[in-house]
Image (spheres, rainbow, N blue to C red):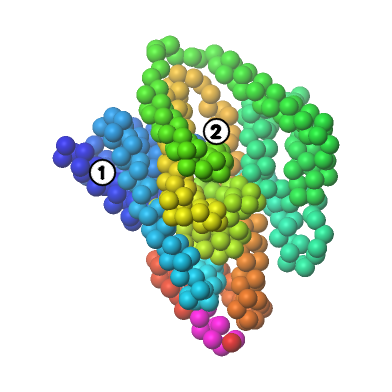
Amino acid sequence: MKKAGRFYKSMCKVGCIGFGGGSALIPVIEQEVIREQKMDSHKNYDKDVMIASITPGSLTVKLASSLGGRNFKIPGMMSGAFLMAAPGAVFAILCLTILTFAQERILSTVQKLSIGVSAFIVALLLEYIMQTLKSCKKEGTERVQKASFLMLAVFVLTCGKNIYQLLGLERMPIFAVSTVYILLSAFFLVFALQGEIRGKMLVPVFVLILLFYLIHGKAHIISSHYAIWTVHTLMIALAIRGLWKEFHSDKKKKSYKKIRFHEVKAWLILLAIALVISVMAEPEIFSFACQSIVSAMFSFGGGSAYLTVADGFFVDGGWITAEQFYGQIVNVVNILPGSVLNKTLVAVGFYAGVNSGEGWQIIAVYVLVAFVISVAVSCAVFHLLYTLYDRFEIMQVFKMIHRWIRPIVAGMLMNIILTMVNQCISTATEIGTSIIGVVVYLLVFSVVNLKLMKKVRPYFLIIGDVVCIFVLLGILG
């Protein structure tokens, strides 16, 4: 019991100090659990990290779940995961509650704070983009060129709405494709081509993706129900065909020992309970829960990447407003410890409950369901792949996703940066200050933060940004 207690304490501790993203906490967890407590082997932990890195969801939560399950069975698996996720989620709800229900008194101050923090967030997103290119550079010039092209292509497909807003144009952009559809098309490409971007199916696959964008772009160039049904059916059929061939192309299958899915079943049961609670409480919560599950399954590419997914599902889906997401959720999520997925989904659940106009009980159900889903989806997919890993050679598809997901996400983050600039411009207009001054501040301090990020602690940078924006707005005001 002492061993379990030390493990749970460590998971809660890492959850409380979990700044810097999941990858930054890999050595912290290793130090706590592997080196100091000697609870597991380095070999097992390395395997955990590898599989956690190529599956969607919160990396640290998946590691906690795996370590807990291997050492303390189902109770340890679930306790470890929830203890890792809980601190950040609780802190996020506390902050958002204060911001929401004391809004009239502190709105102006919060808006100014949001501009200050935005410079830090933009620097974080730029750091992600630069690290993506840096990791590609290790593989050669060709890899960098392909990654850069993919990033720019994704940016062009997603940025139409923000570009038009910056230019003050009222027309509807041709594409402006939601991040959800970008990710769906990326998965379709990998599944249909079995992880290899070549072959006789390459042209038909790209034609279907182009038609898919013309259907789902903001302008809805293709609106015929027959055409939509045909394109969707063909894409689903080709994806299933590719996956089927991938499973049956394995010539090196190992021993066919019985596979145990106990861990996966436990998480699926928990998901089912969350869905039942949502149905019993309010039909709208069930719809929110289903979208939350799908969004969590698309959370590849690191914590910041989920912000693009959440934008597509919940802002475009009408659950929350862009002001709530970029003005409050993004700022709160990025200054608190813990998994971005867990904090963001819980925060979205909070505002979805607030926007429903119901009482505290309904808001609490939204938050609880979102929290359970954020943890359970991450862990269910992780344990499923972990269970299948040693038996089936199905990794080509996942390797391909892992190889290209970061450039895709980096392209989406370029659009998120534009969104944040637009949001700061709107805030500057609302509080009656200079738009040019705010934009110059964002540009200058984002670059300064980027330069200092490896030398100065994040909180000092955020405090410096906030102080400087208050001084600047005082001068401009």
On the image, the x and y values in percent for residue 11 come to: 30, 46
The segment highlighted magenta reads: 469-476
> What's the residue type where badge 2 is placed?
Lys
Image quadrant occupied by the C terminus = bottom right
* Residue named by callout 1: 8
> What's the residue type where badge 1 is placed?
Tyr
* Residue named by callout 2: 399
- In the image, is 136 to the left or to the right of 166? left
Labels 2 and 1 touching (C-beta < 8 A): no
Q: Residue at x 82, y 40 (%)?
A: 223
Residue 278 sits inside the magenta stretch:
no
Of 340 and 284, the residue lying toward us = 284
Q: Which of marks 2 and 1 is in front?
A: 1
Of 38 and 366, the residue lying toward us = 366
On the image, the x and y values in percent for residue 360 come to: 43, 55
Q: Compared to 246, does 375 lie above or below?
A: below
